[in-house]
Image (spheres, rainbow, N blue to C red):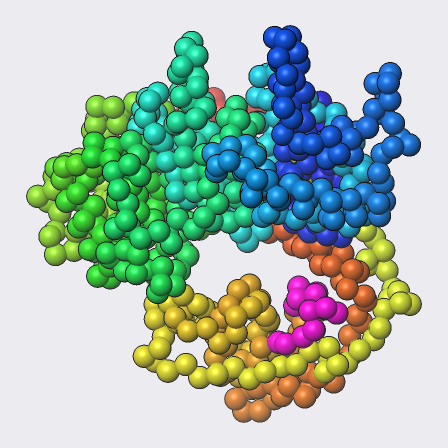
Amino acid sequence: MFEQTFKNIDDVLWKEAGCTTELDYTEQTSWLLFLKYLDDLEQERASKAELEGKSYEYIIDPKHRWSKWAAPKKKDGSFDHDKALIGDDLIDYINRDLFPYLQGFRQRATGPDTIEYKIGEIFSEIKNRFQSGYSLRDAVEYMDGLRFRSQTEKHELSHIYEAKIKNMGNAGRNGGEYYTPRPLIRAMVQVIKPKIGERIYDGACGSAGFLCESYDYLRQGKLSTKQLETLQTKTFYGKEKKSLAYVIAIMNMILHGIDAPNVIHTNTLSENSSDIQEKDRFDVILANPPFGGKERPEVQQNFSIRTAETASLFLQHFIKSLKSGGRAAVVIKTTFLSNSDSATRSLREELLSVCSVHTILDCPKGTFLGTGEKTVVLFFEKGFPTKNIWYYQLNPERNLGKTNPLNDGDLEEFVEFQARFAASNNSWTIRIEDISTNTFNLAPKNPNSDKEPKLDSPMHILSMLKGVEQSSVSIYDEISECLLRDSDCLDCLPPDWDLKKLGDVLKLEYGKPLEKDRRKDDGIYPAYGANGVKCRTDECYWDKPSIIIGRKGSAGEVNLAEDAFWPLDVTYFVIFDENEYDLLFIYYCLKNLRLQTLAKGVKPGINRNDVYEIECPFPKLPEQKRIVKYVGILQAKIDELRVLNQERLEGLSEFNQSVLQNAFSGGISASSTRDRKA
């Protein structure tokens, strides 16, 4: 029942111009879900107080309760349509009355660890993206059908919510930062073995997957009232910089059973590491800090080893935040183990000298969907130096991907072998004396790698390939449904669209030279050349998103810069009126024009005046956003098909090798090749 409710709400959000991505869907679902949960919680507490002959003081005043504006009821308990706000009245109430009221809780709360403060924080960081009060009314009525009265209901809702977070991890450019595969988290928790009474911390908590899984781990068995209270209030701590991730973390922890999560909305790296005192330290740290990010110089100054690499700064923060004798498991890029730059080398040296790095789990490509990065998990204990490191090379004996994600079974052997640091074809131990003191290179080198790996059977791989095909067919069906649902996007030009010259819509500004000494491999900002990012720099020329067009060289190439950047002198970058035009609409428009055909000269280049003369149809801004949403959804589906196609090609290659291995190892009997009569 709950799953269908979420699907119905997603269908409503699909039609909303203000919601364009899976991230928007989850954000809007989250604030509605939170208010519905809060109303059920208050009703439950009020009923309990009444049974005990006590009074209950409501958190939300009568005017702003869910039962007043979202689901007013008649005396017989039926829905009161006459009192329910709808249309513009509902949108006006949400934006001008409800949200400001809820935001005010942050100032009125007695402290940051109260549910009142969380209410104020959540509604200060998100906004209502519904533009149609009729759509919002539909979503509210679907949400009102959910119930949070029992632990079973909460458990089911938490699983559905986790599935939405996972979909975010598979959707679009930034979704992956919200989702770490749960089988990997569970394995990390099982190795660390947290105990009730210990304080558990994640300084880059995203959707709070590590904290939720730790709670589930500790919640097993019969616990005393005191132990349950300890789990609720004194065990789990998180910090998160991004607004949406913070909201999702709060909601995810609530659904798992933690009523007032100790998650703070802050930039963890803005805290000076030298200011961390013993009272600020934790017994257990479990984290997957963002990799690939770059931090500004003022943030780097908070750390003894200065680097722009976000993950390296987080690792320093975690080392400082761990108690003596504390245990940690941290996901980090594989390249951290071998990068030769002075900052990374120094950090490896510090880690080995301050902590006992006892285990390194080498994860295969495809562990994190949507990213090509290979990762490892560092397991360490603070308080004494490293003596021996046990490596485990995770080998699921199949290509990981959308149809074959990592599962708990893949990690069973790792957890079992790690308990006794067992040697095997996939695991080995090195002594600290065997590590170079010049480089402190920790890159995994399996001494058993020369042995031919045993492949899955041909039938098993064939079954996997069939699953890939079925997933592809399912996506084709979704694309067909999308095309039929919005077929008017493909019809002839509507009469209310204006045909405009691009020169009346946008201006092309020349990029600027960037001297060699200002270019840095680990710079904060990307520097765009004609065909994409050419290098990085610590200087920003344009401080907001734009479109870069190749002027010379790869003339006519179009790239999207989603944040501040530097345009090199072989490019143009686009300036336009954001009140009239949508960035992505212009981007798709320029991509569609194939500007390469305008290139002229011996060394082909594009004159911006030629671009200005091109005529293109432009609808009003709301319609531009609707079309961007439509194109974005289709492109996301196409990207999914590309991933599946890569899985198909890799699977076919593995299938071919498995057939040969099977054929020449006695796996094919004489009867299997004999002609049979029908």
Look at the picture and state if 504 lies above or below 39: below
Look at the picture and state if 668 lies above or below 475: above
At x 32%, y 60%, the residue is: 300
Q: Which x, y percent locates residue 366?
A: 44, 43
At x 79%, y 60%, the residue is: 623
Q: Residue furthest left?
A: 433
At x 37%, y 67%, the residue is: 523
Q: Which x, y percent locates residue 238?
A: 42, 38
Q: Which x, y percent locates residue 294?
A: 40, 60
Magenta stretch bounds: 574-588
At x 67%, y 46%, the residue is: 100
Q: Which x, y percent locates residue 4?
A: 72, 28
Look at the picture and state if 367 lies above or below 514: above
Q: Relative to residue 118, is residue 411 drawn left or right?
A: left
Q: Nearer the viewer, residue 345 or 237?
A: 237
Q: Indicate whether residue 468 is drawn in magenta.
A: no
